[in-house]
Image (spheres, rainbow, N blue to C red):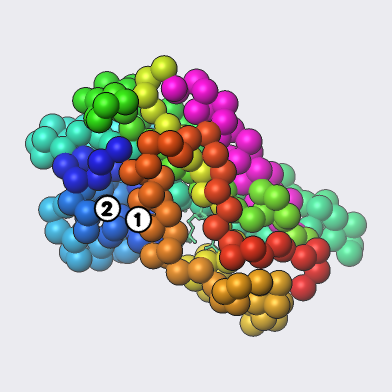
Amino acid sequence: MIIEGRTFVVSGGASDLGRACVRDIVKSGGNAAVLDMNEETGAALAKELGSSIRFFRCDVTDTENIASVVKSTLEWIKETGKPLGGIIPAAGVESPGLMLDKSLNPLSLSSIDFVLSINLRGVLDLVRQFLPALASSPAYGPDGEHGVIIMVASSAAFDGQMGQVSYAASKGAVAAMTLPMARDLSRFGIRVVTIAPSMFDSAMTAMMSDKVRTGLKKAMEFPSRAGQPEEFASLARQAIENVMLNGVVIRLDGATRMPSKL
Ligand SMILES: NC(=O)c1ccc[n+]([C@@H]2O[C@H](COP(=O)([O-])OP(=O)(O)OC[C@H]3O[C@@H](n4cnc5c(N)ncnc54)[C@H](O)[C@@H]3O)[C@@H](O)[C@H]2O)c1
């Protein structure tokens, strides 16, 4: 898929990994519809990137909210004449908690629901609601490609650590649905690629304690540092542009395998 002259929908686009994709898309001549709950960072990004982006306040757990944002995005696309080229559902949250704590309290259902409703249900609902428009977008290139979906899993999909059961469940599901989604959408010329990053510098990982950060660093092979959002965006760009990438989960982790304990 070509970026220039196309519009990409990026949820969680007002912060770190999503925002790096938005900046990269704009740099490559595309437009981005930035969907996020955070109006402050969304407004700051709109100020930075001007008319190439449109910020929409969107809670991906609210299906009516998504429906109205789909409508507004399509109206904006009509105005700009830059058809939909892809969806990057990057909004995600982490809420650490042990399955059973020392006082024998099981993991709360509310924290399980919180993580799954954003990282899994929210991803599916967002993609689902944009799909009719993506499938109807003008075909590009000799393969007649209509668009690409780039989902975000995590190292936790494969080697989740203590306290990551809910997060691993959500990201494991995202990884697992990559191939069947690609199979479902192949007849429409839509590809599906998932990126599974290890630790990347972001607001999410800034909340980690120094102990956790140092422990994770020890688990890294090369390079021995957190990934940068721009490195994530660079792979996302390749996923957009390389038509042979489809139905695959790509680990972006410098050979890091998360240990059981830090
Ligand atoms: N940073 C990492 O180390 C790392 C590693 C693996 C996977 N990931 C995944 O990458 C994605 C992006 O994470 P990030 O590191 O940029 O985190 P981040 O916290 O910087 O950004 C997440 C964004 O999602 C938005 N968001 C949260 N709940 C939402 C909701 N209900 N509706 C709409 N938007 C909502 C937040 O407002 C925020 O802007 C997430 O899916 C995360 O799980 C991150």
Label 2 CB less than 8 angstroms from ligand 1? no
For the N terminus, the quadrant is top left
Are the residues flagged by discs 2 and 1 in contact, CB closer than 8 Å? Answer: yes
The residue that appears at 81% across and 53% down in the rendered structure is 99
Label 1 crowd bin: few (<14), some (14–19), many (20+), radius 10 Å = many
Q: Mark number for residue 195? A: none
Residue 39: tell me if it is visible: no
Q: Is residue 169 magenta?
A: yes
The residue that appears at 66% across and 72% down in the rendered structure is 220
The percent position of residue 14, horizontal first and vertical second, equals 35, 58
Q: Secondary structure at mark 1?
A: helix
Vertical comparison of 95 with 116: above or below: below
Q: Is residue 125 left or right of residue 51?
A: right
Quarter-of-image position of residue 88: top left
Q: Amino acid at mark 1?
A: Cys
Which sits in the foreground, 106 or 78? 78
Q: Is residue 118 left or right of residue 24?
A: right
Q: Amino acid at mark 2?
A: Ile
The percent position of residue 165, horizontal first and vertical second, equals 73, 51
Rounded to the nearest angstrom, the CA distance separating label 2 from label 1 is: 6 Å
- On the image, numbered disc 1 is attached to which residue? 21
Q: Which residues are magenta?
A: 163-186
Vertical comparison of 189 with 197: above or below: above
Vertical comparison of 210 with 200: above or below: below
- On the image, numbered disc 2 is attached to which residue? 25
